[in-house]
Amino acid sequence: MSTFNLVLPYTTKDFRRAMLVLLDEHRPSRMPFFRRVASLPFRIASDCNLLGEIYLVYQTAMHATRAAVYYLPYLDSPALRKRKLRIFMDNDGLPEADSHHYQLARAFRNIGAHLPLADEEFGSHEELCRRVDQETVHFVDVAQRLYSRSLGPWCAVEMLSADWMRALAEALSVHFPQLIREPYFEDCFLHRIEERHAEEAMAVTQMVLQQRPELLDETIRDAKMMTEALDGVWSNLDRIVQQAVRRVNGTEHYGLRLMVDRMAAAFRTSPTVQHG
């Protein structure tokens, strides 16, 4: 049961403390999905369709937040727009027309994933929601709705992103050691991009709350809703992995049973078998 209490933050100076408590309770790396992926037999972990399913859910969730960040409220002054622009550039304005989206797609493609959607099919909210499962649709809906009304969801996601990126890289690198060198992971870890975004999101949100303390309760409440929706992404991915394990085990069990039955039938009908 969560120990977080929305009544706790009475002043803006309590915002950081309240966020750290909330985010500690919702650290992505605590979720079973990452441990389950790391412990998979390679024959399952390397299945191109499973990797594609993981990619689709994860990329959709990341796309939803990357798109939603363009609609953040309260950052309208020239100074705040400049600070927001730096984060946009880190996501979508990388050298040689690259972006985190393209980097992630290449990383999964390079480990053999079958990608169900092409890069440019990650478009509007409505289009994307027709292509993914209901659990992922829920996250996309929550991100679109919450990012545009308060800074709490953005702050929460930025503060958690380094944790889940490391957890994902470590889990998949058990099977694909080269993955850690993919720019999507290596660049972020080397330059501490996600940590920098987290510090910036916290600082900017605190600035806004100092000017508009009446937004505090809504900011904390929406951050909590965002972390709960993010938990749902990892739970959904864990279900996908468990289903893949059951499919493979069921197929292997059926194949073994079929092989035994055929061997028994051949033994019974063999002319060299002496029947009493």
Image: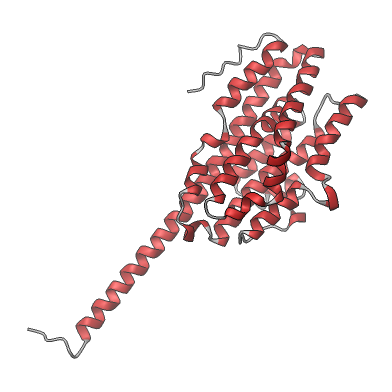
**Of the pair 218 and 30, the residue shown nearer to us:** 30
Which corner quadrant holds the C terminus? bottom left
Looking at this view, name the residue that lies furthest to the top.
10
Looking at this view, name the residue that lies furthest to the left.
276
Snapshot quadrant of residue 6: top right
Q: Is residue 129 visible?
A: yes
Q: Is residue 146 visible?
A: no
Q: Position of residue 34 (x, y in %)?
A: 52, 43
**Of the pair 187 and 63, the residue shown nearer to us:** 187
Q: Position of residue 31 (x, y in %)?
A: 51, 37
Residue under the point 51% across and 45% down: 238
Residue under the point 60% across and 56% down: 52
User: How many numbered marks, from 0 up?
Assistant: 0
**Of the pair 146 and 29, the residue shown nearer to us:** 29
Residue under the point 50% across and 46% down: 239
Q: Is residue 26 above or below residue 21?
A: below
Q: Position of residue 153 (x, y in %)?
A: 69, 29
Q: Position of residue 76 (x, y in %)?
A: 88, 26
